Amino acid sequence: MATNPLAPDWLSLPGDANDLAEGLWPSTTTRNADGELVIGGVTASALAAEFGTPLYVIDETDARTRAAALRTAFEAEFARIGTSARVYYAGKAFLSTEVARWMVAEGLNIDICTGGELAVALAAGVDPARLGFHGNNKSLAEIDEATRVGVGTIIIDSPIEIDRVAAAAARHGTVQAVRLRVNSGVHAHTHEFLATAHEDQKFGVVLEDAPRLVAAIRAEQSLRFLGLHCHIGSQIFGVDGFAESAARLLAVHAGLLADGPVPELNLGGGFGIAYTTADAPTPIRELAAGLADIVSVECRRRGIPIPAIAFEPGRAIIGPAGVTLYEVGTIKPVEVAGGTRLYVSIDGGMSDNARPALYGADYSVRIADRVSGAAPALVRIAGKHCESGDIVVDADYLPADVAPGDLLAVPATGAYCWSLSNNYNFQGRAPVVAVRDGAARVLVRGESIADLLARDTGVSTGSTTEQKDVLR
């Protein structure tokens, strides 16, 4: 059978449209004897029957294993060059109290960037000293609360924050550890990177301004300078971009040592994952070894001690651990110049996964509750919202007999899906469940129509309850 001419160049015609491509799915994912998808020992149909669809499913074993493996790899490789490495879990990717506890239990710290994320971490019982507080516009209230509870590190993102953090720390009688976020002029995405003199973006400060701003930080008795911090992008494969950025950062780092200690350097992260078969993420052990070698060479070249290194891997931990389940509603073949595209509409969409609409992100899809011997057909998985751009999977192959009522599974949705979810078209946000060893439990409950109406001050309690009952 020939590839559909409407398929993108990167998408290959599968020999079997039921196959689960290696690297796209949580590590425990299999198909059982009936051909049904099983994640963490729980079948897709059982999950849908108990919790409904759309449904975010997080494989706890996969998430925790990735967290531990990443931390172990970076600690080992940086110990090899004579220093330590600290890993931060990205709360913005997906944060709940239980996930925060998983990450701490596996030895990670946690990045937060709002007062809400701080509240979640504290509610989970996370030691505030293990938190790093990011953000380009931290409110005065957020800064005050962070210094009051003893957040481990606040990342200074602009000159004005020096005075704000110093004042808050002094008010609470503490000395607040801070990093300075700088722009190295390196922007990386997948296998390519661009190196310029400056970056036009809202985060951080120009690298050339770092000495002046670090001097201002050091002049504040209520602040303690830890080191520089830099992000060069996200969904990054390979180490080339990090090599160029580290060289630029360590040149400034070396100069800062003349006027005081610089115990740390945060090189960021944003390590890529596989969303489709076209993605080939760099193995974590290879990343850790390559980054350690880069830091070692650059420090030796400048004759400076190797600082403690921090990393923020981003989606690499929770992203591959997540799968979203949907139910098929309608099927519509559309004839276009060159061929036929099969539109498969689901009961979710851009309210539970905004990334395709925001970034043009690509995803993959499989039927979750059965297998089929039908020939592969090119499909586009469309959401139910009133937007032509409401597409969850732009292009993939499914068995041609995909039908209303089928369960579909979209892998690699653990990061930036629930956290970007919304109530567009008055759609309640989907629940999040964790699966492990054959059991499922709710991490974050879903929203009902009654939940949404409860916020509308023009609706009486009685009519809210009545509407909820009608829609069940």
Image: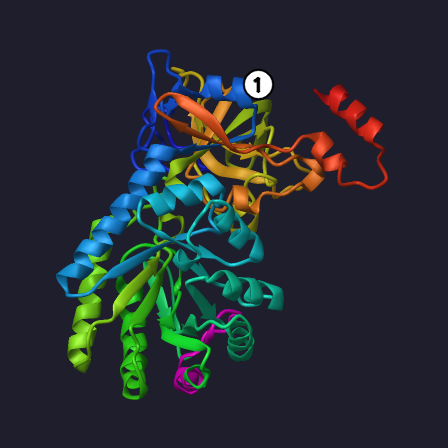
Q: Nearer the viewer, residue 141 or 269?
A: 141
Answer with left or right where residue 423 lies relative to residue 23: right
- The answer to whether 65 is drawn above or below residue 329 in the figure is below
Quarter of the image for the C terminus: give it: top right
Quarter of the image for the N terminus: give it: top left
Q: Quadrant of residue 44?
A: top left
Give the SS element for disc 1.
loop
Answer with left or right where residue 38 lies relative to residue 405: left
Answer with left or right where residue 69 lies relative to residue 402: left
- The answer to whether 142 is drawn above or below residue 54 in the figure is below
Residue at the spot 70% in from the left edge and 34% down from the top edge: 451
Answer with left or right where residue 263 lies relative to residue 182: left
Residue at the spot 51% in from the left edge and 78% down from the top edge: 162
**Numbered range of the magenta stretch:** 198-215
Q: Which residue position holds label 1?
A: 404
Residue at the spot 49% in from the left edge and 26% down from the top edge: 408
Q: Quadrant of residue 42?
A: top left
In the rendered image, residue 355, in percent from the top left (x then y), is placed at 52, 47
Q: Quadrant of residue 331?
A: top right
Local crowd size for mark 1, using a 10 Å CA cut-off: few (<14), some (14–19), many (≥20):
some
Q: Does residue 51 appear anywhere in the picture?
A: yes
How many labels were placed on the picture?
Answer: 1
What residue type is disc 1 on? Pro
In the rendered image, residue 200, in percent from the top left (x then y), is placed at 50, 73
Q: Nearer the viewer, residue 127 or 250?
A: 127
In the rendered image, residue 288, in percent from the top left (x then y), is placed at 23, 56
